[in-house]
Image (cartoon, grey):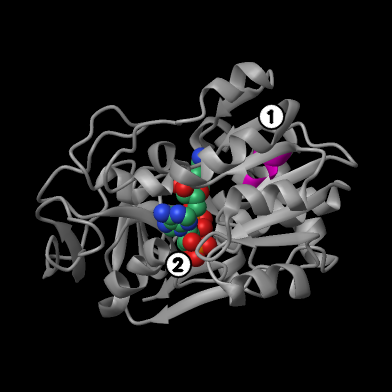
Amino acid sequence: MKAYRLDSYPEGNDFAASIALVDQPDPVANEGEVVFTNELLSLDAGTRMWMTPRTDSYQPPIPLGSVVPGLALGRVTESRAEGFAPGDLVRAFGQWAEKSVVRPELSGLVKLDTSVADARQHFGALGMNGWTALVGIEDVGRTKAGDTVLVSAAAGATGILATQIAKILGAHVIGIAGGAEKCAFLTEKLGLDGAIDHRGDDVEGAIAKAAPNGVNVYFDNVGGPLLDAVLPNMAHYGRIAICGLIAGYAEAQPGPRRFDQILARRLQVTGFFSPDFMDRGPELTERLKGWLDDGRLVVPFEETQGFENLLTAYAKLFTGGNIGKVVVRV
Ligand SMILES: NC(=O)c1ccc[n+]([C@@H]2O[C@H](COP(=O)([O-])OP(=O)(O)OC[C@H]3O[C@@H](n4cnc5c(N)ncnc54)[C@H](OP(=O)(O)O)[C@@H]3O)[C@@H](O)[C@H]2O)c1
């Protein structure tokens, strides 16, 4: 089978120079393992952080010479673990390969609801992005009706869900995204109350205009200069839910420069990480599915056909080439 092997740590977005598409033997399940054919792969920004030698992040670096790990969905071909049988449709933290081999207890392996019309939603609204958005907006941000909520990378997989969940909870929601097309999508298609183009606008001034009474909840996917633009615009006693810091994944960023505003505005800044609430998956999925079925959550997909095109698709997360969830159909 074909697999993507990390041979060196990438510079910037030049993934092809560091990640090789190689042939290797098909995996065989050892005792306690399950093998499944990858039909869809979820491409996630966080993986970029483990493609660096940094040892101070929430995951250790991917060992050089190993296959890149990633969320995968497909049918079981071989099982030596209780509860899984050939033919089951499953999702797990597997590998960027044509097949994944996993241990259920280490990979979050679950059997999926086959009645979901679009299986990609098991990565979007009904998977890690949906859970992260819901927990970040509701539990970490403690969003309530009438709050002003600001979301960065708002047109991406996690952000798009965070904005819509905040709307469902009755908030006034503003998204930050790169470019006029994404901003128009957020206001015209998703009905957000405002959108700020971080490539074009004076972001700090634009937030001040869009949120004259301050931002109560900032769902941050980006960090870096955007966080500096948001801090002086936070309302007193505001909450910042640090979901991701994509501006600093290839190279860690110093800062935030406006750290003083955390004291001045009595802010609460909280990092959170989806593996910490994996056990809440069924409960979170049920709520998200209710909203998805009612048409209150919309998740567009940026789907790439063909395993051989994965690295080009992956770069879109860092160049802003996607609206919604980036997936590869193997
Ligand atoms: N804490 C957790 O458990 C958890 C779980 C899932 C995801 N995350 C985090 O959520 C964030 C989004 O991840 P995702 O996988 O859903 O990707 P995504 O939002 O679908 O794609 C990433 C988007 O980030 C924006 N971006 C990239 N570099 C940027 C920069 N330097 N400044 C401003 N915007 C930039 C781009 O949109 P623009 O065109 O708008 O710039 C891009 O489309 C990441 O930080 C990720 O690590 C965290």
220 and 206: which one is in front?
206
Residue at x-position 75% and y-position 69%: 187
Residue 142 to residue 323: above or below: above
Q: Position of residue 280 (x, y in %)?
A: 65, 36
30 and 13: which one is in front?
13
Badge 2 residue CB within 8 Å of ligand 1: yes
* Amino acid at pointer 2: Gly
Residue 240 to residue 156: above or below: above
Q: Position of residue 273 (x, y in %)?
A: 51, 35
Label 2 and label 1: CA atoms lie apart by 26 Å
Any mark on residue 33, and which?
A: none
* Amino acid at pointer 1: Arg
Q: Which residues are magenta?
A: 133-137
Q: Earlier in the sequence, mark 2 or mark 1?
A: 1
Residue at x-position 51% and y-position 24%: 259
Viewer can see residue 90? no
Q: Position of residue 212 (x, y in %)?
A: 80, 44
Is there CB contact under 8 Å for labels 2 and 1?
no
Where residue 122 sits, quadrant-wise, is bottom right
Residue 136 sits inside the magenta stretch:
yes
138 and 87: which one is in front?
138
Q: Which residue is mark 2?
A: 320
Residue 16 lies left or right of residue 298; in this view the side is: left
Which type of secondary structure does the marked residue at label 1 adopt?
Answer: strand
Residue 311 sits inside the magenta stretch:
no
Residue 158 to residue 262: above or below: below
Q: Which residue is mark 1?
A: 239
Q: Position of residue 254 (x, y in %)?
A: 34, 32
Viewer can see residue 257? yes
